[in-house]
Amino acid sequence: MVSVRDVFSRPLNPLNVARMDKLTTHQAQDDARNEDILIWVNGTLKPKAQAMVSVYDSGFMLGDGIWEGLRLYDGRWSFLDLHLDRLFEAALAIDLNIGMDRAALRRAIADTQQANGMVSDAHCRLMVTRGLKSRPFQHPALSVSGPTVVILMEHSRPSIRRPIRLATVPHQRGLPMTQDPKLNSHSKLNCILACIAAEKAGADEALMLDVHGFVNTTNACNFFIVRRGEVWTSTGDYCMNGITRGKVIEICRKAGIPVYERNFSLVDTYGADEAFLTGTFGAQTPVGDIDGRKIGTGQMGPVTERILQLYKAMVTA
């Protein structure tokens, strides 16, 4: 029988190594401490090789779960209350009882952070699924054991070595009556397929359009352009309304930078002076190339740089 530790110690598949050489918006420096992390699983801190869920878990079997990504700066989890707001709102939307209140979740996050000796440059994946199924079928009534809650933290410092390259793909973020793109669910296959399409086109990440053909988001991040000193992002109707996205809009308004949530096309995008992505992990990541077209100088532009500095000041204040 192959142990979990054996799996972690296996040589990497050459195909996977080639993929790892590609740049992603979640590119991070290697950190040996992550081999010894403790992961919170339903109230117990477990070593990485022992942190497991059942093959009958709703999240594994059906993608039936919700999650949040958190970022630790100087001892504080940035915008933690907003992330918990979104988690509980998502749980309400899918009729999932998390089984813990906000205070209990905050304590569990703090306990996991302390157990791993993390003070800054850490990323947390907080995951909640509908729990164990009695049989391998989709009906929620078959989830009989209550939720599965996992808190996974890694030492993680972003290491984006160049601006991101995007490729427009045919995959869209759907209408709310199919799968609401505002729901941070475990069901990410649509975005994964978009990412695969972008990779096959030689890009790092996918630029996704909305159902009307307007520029929307990427497979993992929110998307902004800068034109003549104005910052544009999508209307937000067909994308995850990211917390970092909202903070960038707030920063622009406070700093007197014109910012608009609006429809815009690929023509507007190709002619932009700057473009950048936003997300909890990478904050603001510059985009240098879209569909083989250089955006501006191909490097981080002055408006993006200013927003980045203002964001750093906000999260460390």
Image (spheres, rainbow, N blue to C red):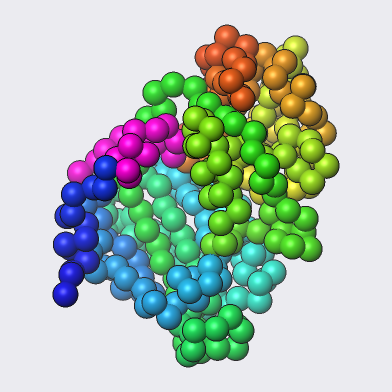
> Which of the pair 306/165 is nearer the observer?
165
Relative to 295, does residue 133 appear above or below in the rendering? below
Q: Which residue is drawn at 66% across and 64% down?
A: 89
The residue sitting at the top extreme is 297
**Left/right of residue 149 with respect to residue 299 in the rendered view:** left
Residue 74 x, y percent position in the rendering: 39, 39
Q: Residue at x 52, y 56 (%)?
A: 68
Chain part drawn in magenta: 15-32
Q: In this view, does 264 lie to the left or right of 159?
A: right
Q: Is the magenta stretch mostly helix, strand or loop?
A: loop
- Residue 246 seen anywhere in this rendered image of the structure: no
Task: Tell me residue 309's x, y (percent).
Answer: 53, 22
Q: In the shown orientation, is residue 65 left or right of residue 170?
A: left
Q: How many marks?
A: 0
Name which residue lies at 25% across and 61% down. 48
Q: With respect to residue 209, does 306 lie above or below?
A: above
Q: Is residue 28 magenta?
A: yes
Residue at the spot 59% in from the left edge and 20% down from the top edge: 292
Front in this rendered view, residue 298 or 43:
298
Give whichever of 110, 241 is nearer the camera.
241
Quarter of the image with the N terminus is: bottom left
- Left or right, 228 with reference to 22: right
Residue 280: x and y, percent?
52, 42
User: Which of the two residues, 292 or 222, is positioned nearer the viewer here?
Assistant: 292
Q: Determine whether 83 is above or below 31 in the image.
A: below
